[in-house]
Amino acid sequence: MFSIPILYAILGGYLLGSIPFGFLIARASGAGDIRDIGSGNIGATNVLRTGRKDIALLTLLLDAAKAGVAALIFNHFFGAPIGLYAGAAALIGHCFPVWLKFKGGKGVATFFGILFATAWPLGFIAGAIWLGCAFITRISSLSALAAAGITPLAAYLLGNFPVALMSAVLAIIIYIRHAENIGRILKGTESQIGKKS
């Protein structure tokens, strides 16, 4: 049932998630407008294409933290279900930030941030899936898709039904945001970790 706390969670989570850290950090560091580099994405993977591993790592951590912080704040004041709304809204804000004409990132780091903040065992499971897939395929996007796709099932099997539902909805968003990557994966042209496109 919709309520005022849920409304606060959605608005607050969206605003926190919509902070475009990749864009701001790249510009502040002198790397220019990240939207003019590589894929034009504001996430850590594209920030890495500037050649600056330090600002890419900082972007990754902050993109994860903004979703985690949103979930933890609203979980503290209103309870776990409300925290999930805030975390989910943060991911949506990251993918569709109002400040950048709704053109944002792909949601992977924020997805992990939500998991570690609301159900840390699932965060480690998703991380293990990403690492295992990356080790085998050397494809970052495929690893992210595998982690996002399997996490809802893992949450369901562990009996965490609210996180299972939330992660399933967020996985759909992540898959939509990776539509071009999926096309390249199917064609066998997706770039691999450590190799230039």
Image (spheres, rainbow, N blue to C red):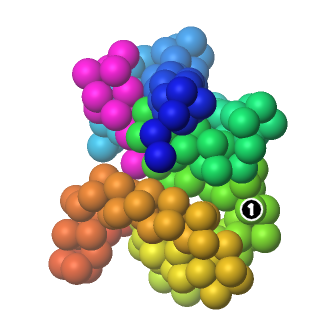
Where is residue 125? Give x, y as percent: 70, 75
- Say whether residue 104 is magenta: yes
Q: Which residue is mark 1?
A: 119
- In the image, residue 22 sits, relative to residue 141, either above or below, namely above
Q: Is residue 181 left or right of residue 83?
A: left
Q: Which residues are magenta?
A: 94-106
Q: Is residue 62 left or right of residue 18?
A: right
Q: Is residue 48 visible?
A: no
Mark 1 secondary-structure assignment: loop
- Say whether residue 139 is magenta: no
**Could you tell me which quadrant the C terminus lies in?**
bottom left
Residue drawn at point x = 19 percent, y = 78 percent: 187
Where is residue 165? Give x, y as percent: 50, 67
| Kind of residue sitting beneath label 1 | Ala
Q: Is residue 3 visible?
A: yes
The foreground one among 108 and 193 is 108
Residue drawn at point x = 59 percent, y = 81 percent: 156
Predominant SS of the magenta segment: loop
Where is residue 54? Give x, y as percent: 68, 35
Where is residue 21? Give x, y as percent: 55, 26
Residue drawn at point x = 29 percent, y = 32 percent: 103
Residue drawn at point x = 41 percent, y = 61 percent: 169
- In the image, residue 130 sits, relative to residue 5, either above or below, namely below
Q: Is residue 94 left or right of residue 9?
A: left
Mark 1 crowd level (few <14, some 14–19, many ≥20, 10 Å Cα): some
- In the image, residue 39 sits, relative to residue 183, either above or below, namely above
